[in-house]
Amino acid sequence: MKLALRAPAKINWFLSVIGKRGDGYHEISSVMQCVSLFDSISLERSGSIELVTDMDLPAEQNLIYKAAVLLRDFAGYKGGAVISLKKNIPSAAGLGGGSSDAATALLGLNRLWELNLPVSVLAELAGRIGSDVPFFIGGPLALAEGRGERLTPLSLRSPVWLLLVKPSLSVSTPWAYGHYAPKLTKKVIDIKLFCLSLDRKDFVSLRQMVFNDLEEAVSGRYPVIAEIKEALLKSGAVVASMSGSGPTVFGVFGTREEAVAASGRMEGHWRGVVSTLTAAGYHAEHEEVS
Ligand code: C5P
């Protein structure tokens, strides 16, 4: 048996940093959203775990490899798998690519190895790999709290078009969290109102609710992020914000055509026109079996 899977990228509609915890992590509140940009992963049974990829990173440091070893050891499985990874999602971009790959590997290997572990167990293992990994076990839209692992699924009926723009630099997540400046007054988002605004494409309301507490520090160090955001808004984005710990900025557009036209004006950066994934499309997009 061979499994061919697609691992989606994400954006953070908003990311509120609530405070620093005793364990070195930060308490957050964020709405995370899967988008139609995918890494491709294929899995085939083998005697040992092997990762085939053109990524410039030792296999042992790759989250997908760590996920496979963790699952095998947890389940006491004796075999392995050849895991082939084709990257389309830029790395260290704030788009959750590595986390999504790891979650997709857990889901896929659970089937390939016929372990039949429940999703709740996979989500717990995912949390050991990284804060964003549990989100990708469930997807495609959820409120993430705690350090990101406490999830409440949300739903969106119709997709929204986005233009993703990433300057050619990488941001370290620990650096971003280590340099954000706590604000005296915190924005508190009404999640029901947020979902209603998203569903109705009420971009005026949405504009008040899309923000990222890490953005000020990261764009302070890399001013190109603020320039991209400004350019997106000038190009017709109804709202724009940095995703995760950056440096990717997303702009929301009324139509795909508008997003494509704006992309043509952003030369010099990596760009992707994507749509948000809704629950209906998510599983079909996520699991491609051959
Ligand atoms: O969980 P993950 O390994 O992805 O986190 C990487 C780093 O990002 C952590 O070591 C921590 O410095 C920072 N982080 C944080 N609070 C979070 C998530 C990540 O401080 N909620």
Image (tube, rainbow, N blue to C red):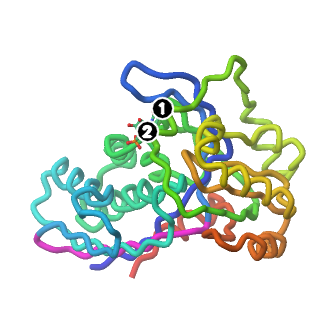
Tell me which segment is drawn in magenta: 36-47
Q: Position of residue 245 (x, y in %)?
A: 54, 45
The residue positioned 90% from the left and 45% from the top of the image is 204
- Identify residue type, mark 1: Gly
* Residue toward you, 68 or 281: 68
- Tell me which residue sits at (39%, 76%) in the image: 4
Instruction: Choose top left, top right, bottom left or bottom right for residue 104.
Output: bottom left
Residue at mark 1: C-beta within 8 A of ligand 1 = yes
- Which quadrant holds residue 106? bottom left
SS assignment at label 2: helix
Residue 219 falls left or right of residue 245: right
Q: Residue at x 57, y 46 (%)?
A: 244
Q: Which residue is mark 1?
A: 178
Residue 174's disc is 2
- At mark 1, the secondary structure is helix
Chief SS of the magenta region: strand
**Residue 30: x %, y % from top left:** 61, 38
